[in-house]
């Protein structure tokens, strides 16, 4: 599933990433990553420690 790929890419990086970097790391299209991240954010699974950067909670 896309959400799992996005979370795995974020965890593997070990640091907050921008959406474009997450897309590249997960091997996905940025638009798809943006959509998945919106869902993950609504579910409280990711957080933004600084503007435009995201990490798993």
Image (cartoon, helix red, strand yellow):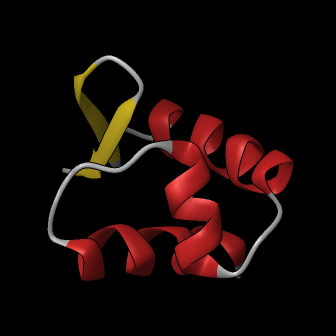
Nearer-the-camera pick, 46 or 19: 19
Residue 54 location, x and y as percent?
34, 41
- The residue at the point 60 percent across, 78 percent down is 26
- To which quarter of the image does residue 23 belong? bottom right
Answer with the quarter of the image where residue 19 lies: top right
How many labels, in total?
A: 0
Residue 41 lies, with reference to residue 32, above or below; the image says above
Answer above or below: position of 24 versus 8: above
5 sits to left or right of 29: left
Q: Residue at x 43, y 76 (%)?
A: 9
Q: In this image, 1 relative to 29: left or right? A: left
Q: Quarter of the image holding residue 24?
A: bottom right
Residue at the (45%, 43%) spot, across then down? 18
Residue 3 left/right relative to 17: right
Please tell me which residue lies in front, 21 or 8.
21
Q: Where is residue 22 in the image (x, y as percent from the top left)?
A: 52, 61
Position of residue 39 in the picture relative to residue 10 (left or right): right
In the image, farthest residue toward the top: 51
* Quadrant in which the N terminus appears: bottom right
Please tell me whether residue 55 is drawn above or below residue 3 in the rendered image.
Answer: above
Residue 27 in the image: x percent, y percent? 70, 81
Q: Where is residue 15 in the image (x, y as percent from the top left)?
A: 17, 59
Tell me: residue 33, above or below residue 5. Answer: above
């Amino acid at each position: 599933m896309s959400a799992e790929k996005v979370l795995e890419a974020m965890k593997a990086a070990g640091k907050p990433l921008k959406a474009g970097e997450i897309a590249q790391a997960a091997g996905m299209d940025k638009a798809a990553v943006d959509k998945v991240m919106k869902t993950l954010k609504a579910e409280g699974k990711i957080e933004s420690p600084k503007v435009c950067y995201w990490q798993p909670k």
